[in-house]
Image (spheres, helix red, strand yellow):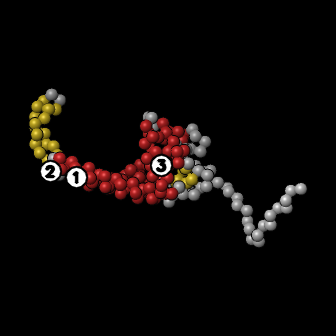
């Protein structure tokens, strides 16, 4: 004889998971958000380019297309400064971008009306997974950008970097 069912406390409601929205974001919205986020990165990296091209330089002998001449080249300290500024700006942008995506939306995704959520719960993916997703984009682009185009025939419109961190991009 089976045991009697456990008593259910008053006011208890069973959990019913409906899953994330099935209104997945398409290629156009995601591409537009990606471009806008790239444009937003420019101010973070601009000081490095300014330092490289406006910093101290020196005239050296060089050969261009077989013709000997003089070239104006940045000094070693100018190159070191530009690399340091690029690293600081890139890390600053990466930090802010991943915090935004981890909470649900980057700036470009807000403009496009899409958000990144966990594939099973529909909740934001968090900063750690957003960092992983950011760097996994390198793998999505490694084979002729096939990982990005994968969403065109995937049932849940997931790219490779979405699959790697178990996320989906949905319309708001």
Q: Which mark is residue 56?
A: 2
- Residue, x 21% and y 48% (percent of image)? 79
Secondary structure of the residue carrying tag 3 is helix
Residue found at the far right of this picture: 1
Whether residue 150 can be seen here: yes
Question: Cα distance, mark 2 to mark 1?
Answer: 11 Å
Residue 79 drawn above or below residue 146: below
Q: Earlier in the sequence, mark 1 or mark 3?
A: 1
- Residue, x 13% and y 35% (percent of image)? 62
Nearest the eye: 38 or 139: 139
Nearest the eye: 54 or 5: 5
> Is the Cβ of the residue at disc 3 closer than 8 Å to that at disc 2?
no
Spot occupied by residue 12 in the image (x, y as percentages of width and height): 74, 68
Q: Earlier in the sequence, mark 2 or mark 1?
A: 2
- Residue, x 14% and y 32% (percent of image)? 63
Spot occupied by residue 73 in the image (x, y as percentages of width and height): 15, 43
Q: Which mark is residue 81?
A: 1
Question: Cα distance, mark 3 to mark 2?
Answer: 38 Å
Q: Quadrant of the C terminus?
A: bottom right
Can you tell which of label 2 and label 1 is closer to the viewer? 1
């Amino acid at each position: 004889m089976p045991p009697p069912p456990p008593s259910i406390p008053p006011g208890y409601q069973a959990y019913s998971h409906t899953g994330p929205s099935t209104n997945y974001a398409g290629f156009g919205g995601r591409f537009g958000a990606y471009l806008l986020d790239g444009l937003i990165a420019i101010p973070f990296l601009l000081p490095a380019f300014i330092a490289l091209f406006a910093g101290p330089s020196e005239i050296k002998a060089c050969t261009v297309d077989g013709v000997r001449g003089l070239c104006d080249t940045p000094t070693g300290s100018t190159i070191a400064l530009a690399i340091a500024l690029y690293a600081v700006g890139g890390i600053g942008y990466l930090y802010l971008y991943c915090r935004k995506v981890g909470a649900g939306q980057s700036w470009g995704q807000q403009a496009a009306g899409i958000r990144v959520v966990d594939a099973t719960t529909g909740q934001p993916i968090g900063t750690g997974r957003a960092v992983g997703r950011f760097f996994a984009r390198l793998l999505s682009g490694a084979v002729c950008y096939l990982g990005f185009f994968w969403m065109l025939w995937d049932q849940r419109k997931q790219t490779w970097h979405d699959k790697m961190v178990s996320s989906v991009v949905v319309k708001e």
